[in-house]
Amino acid sequence: MNTVQVYIEETLNASRLQDVKDIMMTIPHVHNVEFNDELPHDILVEFDANYNVPITIVEKLESEGIHPDIISA
């Protein structure tokens, strides 16, 4: 299992964060999405090894009008 940390520029409320989680869980090979209540701009995404999921995450979030940056892989 691989993990990537994504930074979101926007400040999102709890409802929108849940929407983001739901959207990312639709990406093939993504198994878990976690938010840190103390750092609401950071998202941790777990996905299957051997798949190039990070670029798909970025593209999916950008299509939702969100501005993400991969800060750790």
Image (cartoon, rainbow, N blue to C red):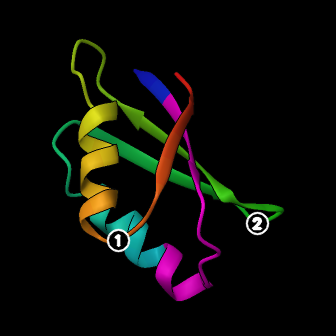
Instruction: Tell me the element at label 1.
Output: loop
Instruction: Residue 25: tell me if it is visible.
Output: no
| Residue matched to label 2 | 37
The vertical placement of 45 against 4, above or below, is: below
Residue drawn at (56%, 53%), measured in percent from left and top?
A: 34
Image disc number at residue 65? 1
The vertical placement of 63 against 11, above or below, is: above
2 or 1: tag closer to the N-terminus: 2
Q: Is residue 52 left or right of residue 6?
A: left
Residue type at mark 1: give it. Answer: Gly
Image disc number at residue 36? none
Q: Is residue 32 left or right of residue 49?
A: right
Q: Nearer the viewer, residue 12 or 15?
A: 12
Q: Nearer the viewer, mark 2 or mark 1?
A: 1
Task: Name the spot of residue 25 as percent of width and height, x first.
Answer: 29, 56
Q: Nearer the viewer, residue 36 or 8?
A: 8
Q: Is residue 34 left or right of residue 23?
A: right
Label 2 packing within 10 angstroms: few (<14), some (14-19), many (20+): few
Residue type at mark 2: give it. Answer: Asp
The vertical placement of 45 against 72, above or below, is: below
Q: Is residue 10 magenta?
A: yes
Q: Is residue 69 magenta?
A: no
**The magenta stretch spans which residues?**
4-17
